[in-house]
Image (spheres, helix red, strand yellow):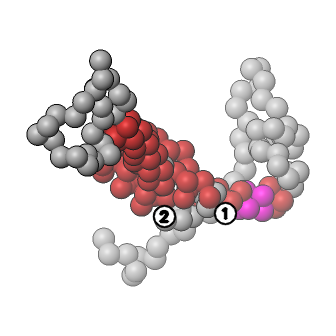
Amino acid sequence: MTATINPAAPHHLPIFITAPGGTDVLTVIVAIFLVLAVLAVGLLFLRLHTLPERIAHRGNKLQFEIVAVLGLLALFTHIHIFWVAGLLLALIDIPDFGGTFNRMAGSLEKIAGIPPGKGADDVPDNGAPAVTQDEGPVEVPTTITPYRIPKEQSHA
Protein backbone atom coordinates (compact mmCIF):
# COMPACT_ATOMS: atom_id res chain seq x y z
CA MET A 1 0.00 0.00 0.00
CA THR A 2 1.28 3.37 -0.90
CA ALA A 3 0.38 6.51 0.97
CA THR A 4 -1.32 8.93 -1.30
CA ILE A 5 -2.27 12.49 -0.55
CA ASN A 6 -5.93 13.24 -0.20
CA PRO A 7 -7.17 14.94 -3.35
CA ALA A 8 -8.73 17.76 -1.25
CA ALA A 9 -5.35 18.63 0.35
CA PRO A 10 -3.06 21.22 -1.23
CA HIS A 11 -0.05 19.86 -3.09
CA HIS A 12 2.49 21.70 -0.88
CA LEU A 13 1.83 20.72 2.75
CA PRO A 14 3.50 22.59 5.65
CA ILE A 15 6.49 20.91 7.28
CA PHE A 16 4.67 20.19 10.57
CA ILE A 17 2.10 17.95 8.90
CA THR A 18 3.43 14.43 8.91
CA ALA A 19 2.56 11.35 6.97
CA PRO A 20 0.46 8.68 8.70
CA GLY A 21 2.65 6.72 11.14
CA GLY A 22 5.47 9.32 11.00
CA THR A 23 7.05 11.17 13.90
CA ASP A 24 5.54 14.56 14.67
CA VAL A 25 8.68 16.70 14.80
CA LEU A 26 6.87 19.86 15.91
CA THR A 27 5.42 18.12 18.99
CA VAL A 28 8.85 16.77 19.94
CA ILE A 29 10.44 20.22 19.57
CA VAL A 30 7.67 21.88 21.61
CA ALA A 31 7.96 19.21 24.34
CA ILE A 32 11.73 19.73 24.60
CA PHE A 33 11.28 23.52 24.65
CA LEU A 34 8.60 23.22 27.34
CA VAL A 35 10.82 21.07 29.58
CA LEU A 36 13.75 23.49 29.14
CA ALA A 37 11.51 26.51 29.79
CA VAL A 38 10.10 24.98 33.00
CA LEU A 39 13.63 24.19 34.23
CA ALA A 40 14.86 27.68 33.36
CA VAL A 41 11.95 29.39 35.14
CA GLY A 42 12.43 27.11 38.17
CA LEU A 43 16.14 27.91 38.37
CA LEU A 44 15.41 31.62 37.98
CA PHE A 45 12.83 31.39 40.79
CA LEU A 46 15.25 29.58 43.12
CA ARG A 47 18.06 31.99 42.23
CA LEU A 48 15.82 34.96 43.01
CA HIS A 49 14.52 33.25 46.14
CA THR A 50 18.04 32.80 47.56
CA LEU A 51 19.03 36.40 46.80
CA PRO A 52 18.80 37.63 50.45
CA GLU A 53 20.85 34.67 51.69
CA ARG A 54 23.54 35.23 49.05
CA ILE A 55 23.68 38.96 49.89
CA ALA A 56 24.08 38.23 53.61
CA HIS A 57 26.71 35.55 52.93
CA ARG A 58 28.70 37.77 50.60
CA GLY A 59 28.76 40.59 53.16
CA ASN A 60 29.72 38.28 56.08
CA LYS A 61 26.74 39.54 58.04
CA LEU A 62 26.11 38.53 61.63
CA GLN A 63 22.47 37.86 60.84
CA PHE A 64 23.21 35.32 58.06
CA GLU A 65 21.49 32.44 59.85
CA ILE A 66 18.36 34.51 60.51
CA VAL A 67 18.17 35.50 56.85
CA ALA A 68 18.58 31.84 55.82
CA VAL A 69 15.76 30.73 58.14
CA LEU A 70 13.49 33.50 56.85
CA GLY A 71 14.21 32.35 53.29
CA LEU A 72 13.27 28.77 54.13
CA LEU A 73 10.09 29.92 55.86
CA ALA A 74 9.15 31.96 52.80
CA LEU A 75 9.86 29.00 50.52
CA PHE A 76 7.79 26.45 52.43
CA THR A 77 4.93 28.66 53.64
CA HIS A 78 4.55 30.95 50.60
CA ILE A 79 4.28 33.93 52.93
CA HIS A 80 6.21 36.58 51.03
CA ILE A 81 6.73 38.89 54.01
CA PHE A 82 9.39 36.45 55.28
CA TRP A 83 11.34 36.91 52.04
CA VAL A 84 10.99 40.71 52.23
CA ALA A 85 12.10 40.69 55.89
CA GLY A 86 15.09 38.52 54.99
CA LEU A 87 16.03 40.84 52.14
CA LEU A 88 15.83 43.92 54.38
CA LEU A 89 17.80 42.17 57.10
CA ALA A 90 20.46 41.15 54.57
CA LEU A 91 20.81 44.70 53.28
CA ILE A 92 21.29 46.43 56.66
CA ASP A 93 24.39 46.27 58.83
CA ILE A 94 23.72 45.37 62.43
CA PRO A 95 26.49 46.81 64.62
CA ASP A 96 28.89 44.29 66.14
CA PHE A 97 28.24 44.84 69.82
CA GLY A 98 30.22 41.73 70.67
CA GLY A 99 33.49 43.30 69.54
CA THR A 100 32.84 46.44 71.56
CA PHE A 101 31.86 44.49 74.66
CA ASN A 102 34.90 42.21 74.27
CA ARG A 103 37.19 45.25 74.15
CA MET A 104 35.50 46.70 77.25
CA ALA A 105 35.83 43.37 79.07
CA GLY A 106 39.50 43.13 78.09
CA SER A 107 40.14 46.61 79.44
CA LEU A 108 38.38 45.78 82.70
CA GLU A 109 40.40 42.55 83.00
CA LYS A 110 43.58 44.55 82.47
CA ILE A 111 42.57 47.05 85.18
CA ALA A 112 41.66 44.22 87.57
CA GLY A 113 44.98 42.47 86.97
CA ILE A 114 43.38 39.37 85.44
CA PRO A 115 45.25 37.84 82.50
CA PRO A 116 43.63 38.72 79.15
CA GLY A 117 40.97 36.28 78.05
CA LYS A 118 40.41 34.91 81.54
CA GLY A 119 37.11 35.67 83.19
CA ALA A 120 36.64 36.30 86.91
CA ASP A 121 35.26 32.77 87.27
CA ASP A 122 38.40 31.21 85.79
CA VAL A 123 40.85 32.99 88.09
CA PRO A 124 41.00 32.02 91.77
CA ASP A 125 40.63 34.95 94.13
CA ASN A 126 43.70 34.61 96.37
CA GLY A 127 43.23 37.98 98.06
CA ALA A 128 39.81 37.25 99.57
CA PRO A 129 39.70 35.64 103.01
CA ALA A 130 38.34 32.13 103.08
CA VAL A 131 35.06 31.66 104.92
CA THR A 132 34.61 28.44 106.86
CA GLN A 133 31.60 27.10 108.65
CA ASP A 134 33.14 27.62 112.10
CA GLU A 135 34.02 31.31 111.73
CA GLY A 136 30.73 32.59 110.41
CA PRO A 137 30.48 35.53 108.04
CA VAL A 138 33.48 37.78 107.65
CA GLU A 139 32.85 41.51 107.82
CA VAL A 140 34.35 43.46 105.00
CA PRO A 141 35.12 47.08 105.85
CA THR A 142 33.54 49.50 103.42
CA THR A 143 35.41 52.56 102.29
CA ILE A 144 32.45 54.04 100.46
CA THR A 145 30.43 56.54 102.45
CA PRO A 146 26.87 57.21 101.39
CA TYR A 147 26.14 60.58 99.85
CA ARG A 148 23.71 62.67 101.83
CA ILE A 149 21.68 65.50 100.31
CA PRO A 150 21.78 68.67 102.43
CA LYS A 151 18.40 69.71 103.82
CA GLU A 152 18.25 72.98 101.88
CA GLN A 153 18.58 71.06 98.56
CA SER A 154 16.09 68.32 99.36
CA HIS A 155 12.57 68.74 98.01
CA ALA A 156 10.81 66.70 100.69
Return the x and y of residue 78 as percentages of the image width and height: 30, 40
Point out residue 27 in the picture as x, y percentages from the top left corner.
33, 36
- Of residue 113 and residue 83, the one placed in the foreground of this image is 83
Helix, strand or loop: magenta stretch: helix
Helix or strand or loop: what does disc 1 sit on? helix
Q: From what the image shows, is residue 155 above or below residue 126?
A: below
Q: Which residue is mark 1?
A: 100
Q: Which residues are magenta?
A: 103-108
| Residue at x 18% of width, y 46% of height | 10
Residue at image x 44%, y 42%? Answer: 36
* Mark in front: 1 vs 2: 2
- Tell me the residue that label 2 is attached to: 91
Single out the residue that lies furthest toward the top: 1
Judge left or right: residue 119 versus residue 31: right
* Residue 43 falls within the magenta-colored stretch: no
Q: What residue is shown at x 77% (from left), y 45% (from top)?
A: 119
Q: Earlier in the sequence, mark 1 or mark 2?
A: 2
Q: Quadrant of the C terminus?
A: bottom left
Circle 1: residue type: Thr
